[in-house]
Amino acid sequence: MHHRRIVIVTAVHAPSAEFLGEAYESLCAQELPPGWEWHWVIQEDGTTDLVRPHVPEDARVTFRQGRPGGPGVARTFALAHADGTYVKVLDADDQLAAGVLARDLAALEADPTIGWATSRALDLMPDGSTVGFPGDPEEGPIERGAVLDYWKANDFRAQVHPATLFVRQELLLALGGWMALPASEDTGLLLALNAVGRGWFSRETGLLYRKWKGQVTGQAAHAETTERAARMAVVEQRATALASFAWRDPARTV
């Protein structure tokens, strides 16, 4: 394992492949401390011929394909090529904000009891304008259980955005990666991480979250009542079970 590398993990399918160039530009604009580098792993959720033409030609970029199973499956497949200390999520249609990798890295390097970090996200609208999310928490540590408590009290909406996640790779692997769900797999991981350890929130913008007509979370199936209720139930049960076991990384216990 390369101990001074951040692995950027991106799940992509054909409709979102056209945005990979902008995601790449936002990644190339990041500045890291001396001795640190990034490696971008792009995993197609499928085996089409439609994504590869949009993948940047860069030695720091790895492109792989696999049997389709949704974004959680694709990201978990990508972990086979995640040769670093930290993993950062970047969806194919989103963009990193300036400085976010360095801020995330600084938060976790400064405090070994913090296992993951999130940051402020802005919706990137089709006209290029941005819209903020209400209710961002204060900058600083997020204690164990705080995300689950907020999520249950606010119609299954977390106070921090799972698409901004930065996490210690070994902790991510210990929890099995993303949940095996057709959606909300990233929320499930976020709640699981918070069930077993402390996190961090940065109030500086870390992500531009694109809103567009082909967005998976904007489709009718994402909000279908019966499926959504089942997804939320299993997400909560997993987080509650982890909390009840009182499992945590012993190397990072406060």
Image (tube, helix red, strand yellow):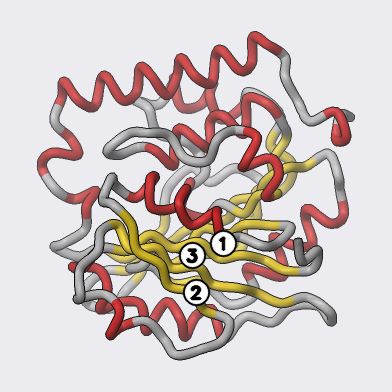
| Image mark for residue 62 | 2
Q: Is residue 231 above or below residue 209?
A: above
Amino acid type, mark 2: Thr
Amino acid type, mark 1: His
For image coordinates 72% across by 31% down, the residue present is 197
- Secondary structure beneath disc 3? strand
**Residue lying at the far bottom of the rendered structure:** 57
Q: Is residue 200 visible?
A: no
Q: Position of residue 106 (x, y in %)?
A: 79, 62
Precedes in sequence: disc 1 or disc 2: 2
Q: Quadrant of the C terminus?
A: top right
Q: Position of residue 18 (x, y in %)?
A: 25, 78
* In this rendering, position of residue 45 left or right of residue 43: left
Q: Position of residue 76 (x, y in %)?
A: 47, 48
Label tally:
3
Amino acid type, mark 3: Leu
Which of 247/43 is in front?
A: 43
For image coordinates 38% across by 45% down, the residue present is 73
Which of 114/146 is in front?
A: 114
Q: Are marks 1 and 2 in contact (CB under 8 Å)?
A: yes
Residue for badge 3 = 207
For image coordinates 43% across by 72% down, the residue present is 63
